[in-house]
Amino acid sequence: MDLDALIEKTVTGLGFELVDVERSPRGRVLRVFIDQQDKPGGVDVEDCAYVSHQLSRVLAVEGVDYERLEISSPGLDRVLKKPADFARFAGSEINLRLRLPLDGRRNFNGVLHGLRDGKLRLTIDTGEVEVDLGDIDKARLVPKFDR
């Protein structure tokens, strides 16, 4: 079983959503970002400690070589990767970076309108654009702070 699948199976089995997995360049640090959609305020320190404890045991049993495991919430600028993420956060402002330029631009800020036929719809300053999911390099929520 590959590492991402192992982590996802463990995290989802504990009742959390796996948002992202990052590895340091040499694979010595594993950063796992989790969420819990139904929990007001999202995950807390106790949730992260619980997942860390369980996941470190699974990684040891599976013989995964790493030095440090970090478990965290995705934060206010949560990364969007899966089609379900783009549907869940429709109506939110996002920052989008493409692999290749579209009309001479790679970076877009705008309001996400979800997915239609495998294409992300986004309203930006010049109108609406549609982008294939495969063309997205990185997508993140733009943090909103209440005043």
Image (spheres, helix red, strand yellow):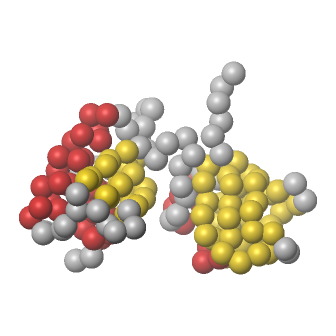
Q: Residue at x 31, y 49 (%)?
A: 70
Q: Quadrant of the N terminus?
A: bottom left
Q: Where in the figure is residue 89, as x and y percent of width and height?
A: 60, 51
Q: Residue at x 29, y 41 (%)?
A: 48
Horizontal side, residue 40 vs residue 52: left or right: right
Quadrant assignment, res 136: bottom right
Horizontal side, residue 103 vs residue 28: left or right: right
Q: Is residue 112 above or below residue 49?
A: below
Residue furthest to the front:
26
The front one of 18 and 33 is 33
Residue 83 showing in the rendered view: yes
Q: Where in the figure is residue 67, as x and y percent of width and height?
A: 23, 57
Horizontal side, residue 115 vs residue 37: left or right: right
Count the numbered circles shown. 0
Q: Where in the figure is residue 147, as x and y percent of width and height?
A: 69, 21
Quadrant assignment, res 62: bottom left
Q: Where in the figure is residue 144, as x and y percent of width and height?
A: 65, 36
Q: Residue at x 35, y 34 (%)?
A: 44
Q: Is residue 12 above or below residue 44?
A: below
Residue 119 showing in the rendered view: no
The front one of 15 and 56 is 56
The front one of 38 and 95 is 95
Q: Is residue 131 above or below residue 24?
A: below
Quadrant assignment, res 50: top left
Q: Residue at x 76, y 60 (%)?
A: 108
Residue furthest to the top:
147
Residue furthest to the left:
61
Q: Is residue 106 above or below residue 58?
A: below
